[in-house]
Amino acid sequence: MSHILIVDDHSDIRRLLTITLGKAHEIIEAEDGVSALEAVRRHHPKFVLLDVMMPGEMDGLQVLDAIKGDPATQDILVAMITARGQTGDGDDARKRGADAYFVKPFSPLQVVSWVKGKSN
C-alpha cells in the first residue's frame, strides 16, 4: 500500500482527500510546509498532494522546490492542489517539478484518477 502525504491548512480538504483515497492508500497529513517536509523525510511517500498557499515559514512552492531539489526525495510525485488558477501559476509549478496541478474547487475523482494512473 503506497503512502500519500496530504498537505493543506484546511482540515476539510485533508478530510475530503483522506476519505477519497484512504481505502487504497496509507494517508499521512500535514497542515503546513515545515511539517510537510518532516513527513516527507520520515515516510518518503509515493505521492504528495500539496496546497500552494499555506501559513507559516514555507508555502507549497517552497516545499515543492525542497522535494524536487533533494536527490533523496526528487522521485516523489507531487500534485499541487490550489485556488491559484491562472495559467501562469500551473506553468510555474510544472517548471519547478510539479507532476500535476489541480485547481480548487477540484474533483476528488480527478485526483483519484491521477493517483491510479501513476500507481501502475
Image (cartoon, rainbow, N blue to C red):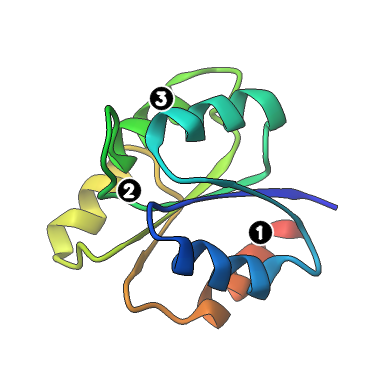
SS of the residue under disc 1: helix
- Give amino acid for label 3: Ala
Disc 1 target residue: 118
Residue at the outermost front position: 11
Q: Position of residue 60 (x, y in %)?
A: 33, 42
Which residue does the image show at 29% across and 46% down from the upper left?
A: 54
Looking at this view, is 118 or 112 the one in front? Answer: 112
Q: Are marks 1 and 2 in contact (CB under 8 Å)?
A: no
- Look at label 1 and name its amino acid: Lys
Mark 3 / mark 1, whichever is N-terminal: 3
Mark 3 neighbour density, 10 Å: few (under 14) some (14–19) many (20 or more)? some
Name the residue type under label 2: Arg
Q: Residue at x 65, y 75 (%)?
A: 20
The residues tagged by marks 2 and 3 sit, at their Cα atoms, a distance apart of 14 Å
Q: CA distance from mark 3 to mark 1?
A: 21 Å
User: Label 2, on which residue?
Assistant: 94
Q: Earlier in the sequence, mark 2 or mark 3?
A: 3
Q: From the viewer's side, name the closer residue of 21 and 86.
A: 21
Dots 3 and 1: beta carbons under 8 Å? no
Q: Is residue 16 left or right of residue 18?
A: left
Q: Closer to the camera: disc 3 or disc 1?
A: 3
Q: Which residue is mark 3?
A: 66
